[in-house]
Amino acid sequence: MTSEIYYTIEKTATAEFKDRGSRFIAYVCPISSAEDFKMRLNEIKKDHHKATHHCFAYRLGLDGNNFRVSDDGEPSGSAGRPILGQIDGKGLVNVLVVVVRYFGGTLLGVPGLINAYRSATALALQTTPLVQKQVEQEIRVHFDYTQMNEVMMIVRQYNCRVVKQDIQLFCDMVLAVPKNRVADLSYKLQEMRNVEISPALQ
């Protein structure tokens, strides 16, 4: 994965895997925050309140450090890690997978569980299209209202997203700019009179 693009999903998908009477239902969901994750997990738990386990894994953000796994009562390492392995195998971020298990009466053992959680996740990921997105950087632009049309023309030209705007006599705008175009865009805007550019405050 280059530092300018990343892969994620935009649609929720589901798939089912069966082994010796146990049902493993995988839900793949796009998420953008830990709050998103909690909400999705609670919804799935509510829909499957009679299930034996609700195991999950997610990976958020581009730095590789924001992830979480849960075996939810299954033997350690038999559920959450195999789920995360499938997410990472496809190089995905901002993705949650929850696998709901209905116990079928036969113990599968750790190798059987790893295979079941991995397979359910893989099936669900196959049913949703992967989306390539550009890594964005946020910048703040300050300009005179009379320059609005000119600024917006450049914003469109460089495929930027307007994240926030405060339109008055003087305008403040936070733009999400494709990382590989920040330098060009900044140069273009600075060619205009009285336009100030600064990093957006987090």
Image (cartoon, rainbow, N blue to C red):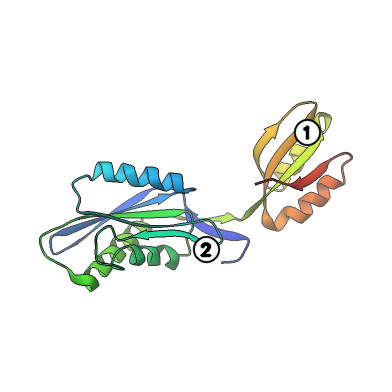
In the rendered structure, which amino acid carries the disc numbered 1? Asn
| Count of numbered marks | 2
The outermost residue toward the left is: 105
The outermost residue toward the right is: 193
- Helix, strand or loop for disc 2: loop
Q: Position of residue 99 (x, y in %)?
A: 29, 56
Answer whether residue 128 is visible to the viewer in this image. Answer: no
Label 1 to label 2, Cα distance in Å?
39 Å
Name the quadrant containing residue 84. bottom left
Residue plotted at (28% across, 63% down): 117
In the rendered structure, which amino acid carries the disc numbered 2? Gly
Q: Position of residue 82 (x, y in %)?
A: 34, 67
Label 1: how many residues lie within 10 Å, few (<14), some (14-19) or many (20+)? few
Q: Tell me, for residue 64, which label it has, or none.
A: 2
Q: Earlier in the sequence, mark 1 or mark 2?
A: 2
Residue plotted at (17% across, 68% down): 108
Q: Mark 1 and 2 residues: CB-CB less than 8 Å, in contact?
A: no
Label 2: how many residues lie within 10 Å, few (<14), some (14-19) or many (20+)? few
- Looking at the image, residue 140 sits to the left or right of residue 50; the answer is right
Name the quadrant containing residue 36. top left
Q: 31 or 11: nearer the eye?
A: 31
Q: Tell me, for residue 177, which label it has, or none.
A: none
Q: Position of residue 77 (x, y in %)?
A: 31, 68
Which residue corresponds to mark 1? 149
- Looking at the image, residue 122 sits to the left or right of residue 200; the answer is left
Q: 21 or 38: nearer the eye?
A: 38
Residue plotted at (37% across, 45% down): 40
Residue 138's place in the image compared with 88, above or below, is: above
